[in-house]
Amino acid sequence: MKAVVYEKPFSVTVRDVEDPQIQHPNDVLVRVTSTAICGSDLHMYEGRTAAEAGIVFGHENLGIIEQIGSGVTSLSEGDRVVMPFNVACGFCKNCLAGKTGFCLTVNPGFAGGAYGYVAMGPYKGGQAELLRVPFADFNCLKLPPGNEFETDFVLLADIFPTGYHGCELAQVSPGESVAVFGAGPVGLMAAYSALLRGASKVFSVDRVPERLAKAEGIGAIPIDFTKGDPTEQIKEMTGGEGTDKGVDAVGYQAQAHDASHEEPAVVLNTLVQTVRATGRLGVPGLYVPSDPGGPDEAAKHGQLLVSIGKMFEKGQQMGTGQTNVKAYNRQLRDMIIAGRAKPSFVVSHELPLDAAPQAYEKFDQRIEGYTKVVLHPGHALAA
């Protein structure tokens, strides 16, 4: 089958790799119809992780079940399904508690597994024509047949639940004000989720004009951090108090306010300043224990200088960690079907699998309006 394979920093290729096989009675094979490029993929693409050549990328996957293992009971060949990026068993202590992002079974020695991601287990990614899904009864979410809502449903694999998770970590409630740092796909989903949860005012902080325009288009207030201290801009619009809640949808590759260099802790520290006393911060943005490209030795080991003193003084609380997708994907699916949510507004490009190398390059450079790319395996690259 054809798949997107990591070669070296800033280089992926589409080439033939071995087809996946049923390895366990609870496996299914899915013929991938849509698979998205994620900002988390860019961390590997840029060489900012320990990823080695040969990894098949892709953890946001949707398709049609082509083959089922003998132990699968709730699924059939021909079912249309979307898979959480978390690979989870469904029966360990964390899965039973709903913390499927931290499964203790699928990646021995580590809490959590994922498709096509460094250190997250032996599971090949779905930026490919076929995908093996383990523990399929648990991991596959059934979708209505056909192709309606295709680009909405593929976002259930990661970014829509992740944006919602940021709001859950921050405990966003109706009527509250929220500052969301980052207007990439996850940040836009966090701002959108805050509005779905009834927030009265949502600020979206970024520097990329296309992203800020998308945020404004859903009713958020765009804040360009290159035009002035974002905390001061937001406080001017909140009577000097700051927001009730804040979400970090950026992570460890955050840019300094003048956009001249990376400053890994700047979003965390700016949120501490922006959110009012006794407010709460949600941090779905990715932070890693090892960053080969970190700007200093501490950052290279995942150690950041965070304003814990100010946070303590203000009595703030913080929730962190990757998303437990299964906690949200069924409900969010039903909101899409009911017409209450349409997350595909973030999708800027739908391309065939063959176009992945160019798509990675342009998405990484934030050029030509690339905000979220969905690849469709099986569609030939147009001449």
Image (tube, rainbow, N blue to C red):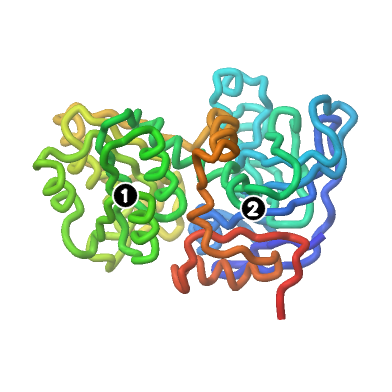
Quadrant of the rendered image containing residue 338: top right
Q: Position of residue 121 (x, y in %)?
A: 66, 41
Q: Provide the secondary structure element on which disc 1 rests.
A: loop
- Image vertical order of residue 250 relative to residue 211, above or below: above
Q: Which residue in the protein does label 1 denote?
A: 220
Q: Is residue 111 visible?
A: no
Q: Which circle's residue, 1 or 2, is located before the other in the chain?
A: 2
Q: What residue sits 31% from the left and 49% below the top?
A: 220
In the rendered image, which quarter contains the N terminus?
A: bottom right
Q: What residue sits 75% from the left and 39% below the top?
A: 133
Q: What residue sits 46% from the left and 53% below the top?
A: 185
Quadrant of the rendered image containing residue 134: top right
> Type of residue at label 1?
Ala
- Rate crowding at label 2 as few (under 14), some (14 to 19) or many (20 or more) other CA atoms within 10 Å: many
The residue lying toward the viewer, choosing from 10 and 350, is 350
Q: Is residue 146 visible?
A: yes
Q: Which residue in the protein does label 2 denote?
A: 58
Disc 1/disc 2 C-alpha distance (Å): 29 Å
Q: What residue sits 35% from the left and 28% below the top?
A: 171
Q: Position of residue 268 (x, y in %)?
A: 28, 44
From the viewer's perspective, is 299 left or right of 42?
left
Q: Provide the secondary structure element on which disc 2 rests.
A: loop
